[in-house]
Image: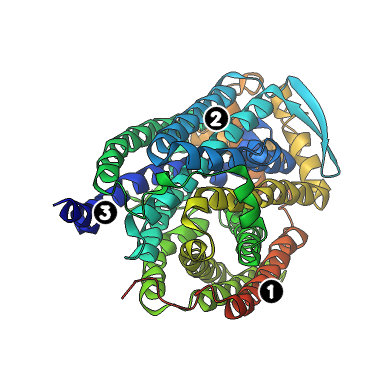
Amino acid sequence: MTEKIKQTLRDSKVARWTALAIVAFTMLCGYFFTEIISPLKPLMESELGWSSSDFGLFTGAYAWFNVFLFMLILVGIILDKVGMRISAVASAVVMVIGALVKYWAINSLSGDVTAIDIHFLGKNYVMSQQLLWACLGYAIFGVGVEFAGITVSRIIVKWFKGKEMALAMGLEMACARLGTFAAMAFSPVIVSRFDIPQVILIGAILLIVGLISFMVYFFMDIKLDKSIDDDDLDFSDEKFELKDIKKIVVNPGFWLLALLCVLFYSAVFPFYKFGTDLVFNKFGVPMENGMLLGFIPKGASIIPSLLPFGTLFLTPIFGNIYDKKGKGATIMIIGAILLIVSHVVLWLPSMNSVAVAIFMVILIGIAFSLVPSAMWPSVPKIIAPQLLGTAYALIFFIQNIGLMVVPTLLGTTLDRTNPGVVAKMEYFKTSGLEQGIVQPEAQAIFEKLTADGAITHDVSKLTSGEVSAVITQLRAEGIIPAYDYSKTWMIFVVLSVAALGVALLLKAVDKKKGYGLELSNIEK
């Protein structure tokens, strides 16, 4: 009878796919909040007065605590010590706290009051109270969402090992990408009807719903543990010790997967942050925030949003191929090659076709389906089950180094290679409109926006939204020059080439060590 219960719970398709749906929904909410500000860079420059360096520092702040405080190492150990259900709920609580701090900072604090002056990556950052606390809130959230990602990865292994594990991981990643797509596509629409703080608040409310979802899983996990009390998939009977970290770090397969992860993700995730701005500046797609036919978002942000949209369908397909046919290392190599092609074409200074840009973004999406669909299910082939929580944590830790450094480097490079843009922005905004002055170059635009009803106040009483509207139009008409992204985008090209080199090396090491990355996941 006991044996029957064991087989019934995790071997039941309804049970394991229900568990996946519950935890995947929370990850959807987490990824929605992660990218909710990404398509708003031009608006944050014109309305909040942030520079590209400020925006890059803010987006890189996601990983501050994960890297500098070694939080991912700590949460991995916590996961191995206290188990998945407690870790799941704890991670969601941390996400909610970080989101609320970020909302409070953007909504309540001034961008004019200096809080701290720091030197980072060769640049001096003078941070306002608003920017500092927004960064700290995002850093807290970053701990929570990465903690959740590690926990969910292990939850999937617990329910799906020996079954459709790669497909399950692919579907979970697809749900996460749906959250990214929703943020990239609809955040500009939401902000056009409310404002930036309200967009963040909506994301925080979704995270609270995600916390409730993890609480539901808490009780489902208890039921599972009772049914597999002495099963080899119950990780709780294997006690983790700190010395076991050595077993992970001496494994060459682990390091190659970790390097591939940081290089590949650093060439994709920061694209979300700067992709809308690239489309706006290089390809001339306007920052419109309306809807076509009442339900299709339009404007510059819709093009980068196509990247995660493509992964919704392709990641599970490629994961299913890995489950049934294998070829995991080969799948990762193909993905890295596609990423190189995409970034090289987007980098080419002479390439300014919107149609080609759309195709390249879709190609990045295909690459982003290929590599993760094989990379994450490969970890259990290289690392022992009782060490998986810490192994995932170490990989996420290394990944977060890239997610901290690369966006900051992108923002700094963009400002340094475009001094004229920053100077013009300050000339019209700081020295002009915010002082109640309309410079001669802006007079015609100011009058047009007033006639159209976009500006309803006297020049001495302009709201931040009205100032933003003038700045946006000045940029659209070229009075404030567009950013030149050519040198900045080379960073993505270099990362992509390095990722391919690591993927090729991983396949060679797999052949030598016999990890089984080219073998199927489903046990016959």
Identify the image quadrant of the C terminus: bottom left
At 45% across and 45% down in the image, what residue appears? 151
Residue at the (55%, 30%) spot, across then down: 455
- Report whether 515 appears left or right of 173: right
Q: Amino acid at mark 3?
A: Arg
**Residue 523 versus residue 208 in the image, above or below:** below
Q: Give the left or right position of residue 342, taking residue 236 as reference.
A: right
Q: Which of the two marks, 3 or 1, is nearer to us in this view?
A: 3
Q: Residues within 10 Å of mark 3 (few under 14, many from 20)?
A: some
Residue 203 vs residue 293, the one in the foreground: 203
Mark 3 vs 1, N-terminal side: 3
Compared with 389, 259 (above or below) is: below
Label 3 element class? helix
x and y percentages locating residue 274 in the rendered image: 62, 52
**Left or right for 291, reference 307:** left
For label 1, count other residues whose C-alpha is less than 10 Å away and answer few (under 14), some (14-19) or many (20+): some
Q: Position of residue 291 (x, y in %)?
A: 39, 49
**Could you tell me how many numbered marks the image carries?**
3
Identify the residue position indicated by label 2 in the image.
Answer: 455
Asked if the residue at tag 1 contacts the one at tag 3, i.e. Cβ–Cβ closer than 8 Å, the answer is no
At x 73%, y 61%, the residue is: 491
Looking at the image, tell me whether mark 3 or mark 2 is earlier in sequence order. Answer: 3
Residue beneath the point at 71% across and 43% down:
52
Instruction: Name the residue beneath numbered marker 1.
Output: 501
Mark 2 near mark 1, Cβ–Cβ under 8 Å? no
From the image, tell me which residue sits under label 3: 16
Secondary-structure class at tag 2: loop
Q: CA distance from mark 2 to mark 1?
A: 54 Å
Residue type (three-letter) at the residue carrying disc 1:
Gly
**How far apart, in angstroms, are the residues tagged by discs 3 and 1?**
37 Å
Q: Nearer the viewer, residue 411 or 265?
A: 265
Q: What's under tag 2, amino acid-wise?
A: Ile
